[in-house]
Image (spheres, grey):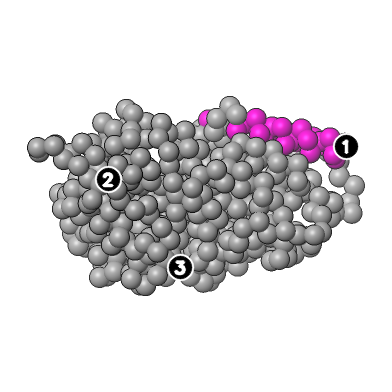
Amino acid sequence: MARLRSGRLWLYRFVALGLVLGLLVGCGAPQTAPTAGPAATGGTQATVAAPTTAPVTEKKLSGEITVLVWNITPEMDKVLQDQAAEFEKTHPGTKVNVTLVPFDQFNTKLTLLMSSGTPPDLAAMPGDIMNYVQQGLVVPLDEFFNADPVLSDPAKSRTEAYDLVRFDGSHIYVAQYGPLCGMQLYYNKDLFDKASVEYPNENWTWDDFRAAAQELTITEGDETVQWGCDLGFLVGWNGGWDPLVWGRGGQLYDTNFNPEKLTLNTPEVIDALQWMQDLIYKDKVAPSPAVQSVLSQAGGPFLSGKVAMVIDGCWMLSAYKGASFPIGMTVIPKGPKGRFQTLWYAAQLVMFQGSKNKDLAWEFARWLAVDRTANEMMASSGQNCGAPIVREFDELYSSAWKDVPGGDACVKCLEGGRNGSLWTPNWNEIWDTIINPEWEKFMNGTITAQELVTTIEPRINAKIAEQ
């Protein structure tokens, strides 16, 4: 099925336990009243002399809190449970109750708890976070962050990440921990070697990507048996379209948070989307949605071994490392106006106004970000393609990618990163009823990029105006 890949579906699963969008997260991308997006500092192996494990609160912490998140895998679910148990050991007299629910039940569970007057103290960031913020149900965390000597210091923490979660354009509404991340170019070294094609590198443009894909595509008669590339997460509205459009000098919206309108019917957007579609139907170097469905039986297009390259998210590193062939990585290619990258969230927790123990809730959220043992537990999963909020722990998270050629793209991708998520209260309705039906036609090759944007732009903007 050609349905537009939901970044919220993929990224929420990813960021819940700190695997990088928003996990993303998010449905889109932005920053306006926080500007065009934070320029993430992605230097590797940064060190900080001062320890980051000492509690900063002078209040005696006691009592208990509840933390609501969704299941990812049994192994990753255990990470947060173990972190909670470790926190209780180092904070005597406290109790952290972690509640894990299936992903598709999370929003329902949270809604029931909120309506019954018993909200969790902390929860993974819900998809309808904008509604919670606008209703005043989420605690702005600026006061906590500003008082923290580690999380408030740009030399010690990647404070640019806070701009991703200023849902009212001003205040910080989410505590993040674990790694920030973006997209990378993954490639099958065997297929490149067999074709005697040079591996992708940091100087590549999107034209270089396309040319290599053409060289690496193999047909036998009328049948394609090897594809030069797969679109991967380039088809993702929430961060896939953006790098292609930004690299051409365009913009999809005026701000990430409550945009007044989307600007899709522009030469830059049309050219970016048509370039993407042409890889499938004109150049025939990328599998169509129908072929992707067949290749999914082998784990997906790239893991099938029949695709040479894919642009995909940080959350795919662990799966791709398990391929039956050697992989390499690099940063995504550059456009005519330069290389631009979507920056996705680290793992996220929001605090609710109904919390009866905000001090303990904050200390746990903070501890996940600044404590070495907590970060060792997170990094031990080996699935973190990115760089942590707290710079001191860069070396811990590098264990996930340092054995992959070009794996430092996991950190380099943060350089020049921009917010890749769009937030508006009725976005889910816009997504499901306006974008996806037309996007399926586009990905099936029955309409052009011009026809796509001409159809959806006025309908999207009319729906936004209803808010």
The stretch of residues the image draws in magenta is: 76-102
Q: Give the class, few, some or many, for how many residues have Cα within 10 Å of label 3's Cα (few <14, many ≥20).
A: many
Task: Give me the residue at 76% from left, 47% from top.
Answer: 371
Residue behind mark 3: 255
CA separation in Å, label 2 and label 1: 61 Å
Contact between marks 2 and 1 (CB within 8 A): the answer is: no
Task: Give me the residue at 35% from left, 40% from top.
Answer: 190
Task: Give me the residue at 66% from left, 56% from top.
Answer: 45
Q: Quadrant of the C terminus?
A: bottom left
SS state under label 2: helix
Residue behind mark 1: 92
SS state under label 1: loop
Is residue 118 toward the left or the right of residue 187 in the image? right
Q: Give the class, few, some or many, for how many residues have Cα within 10 Å of label 2's Cα (few <14, many ≥20).
A: few
The furthest residue to the left = 221
Residue behind mark 2: 195
Q: Is residue 426 visible?
A: no
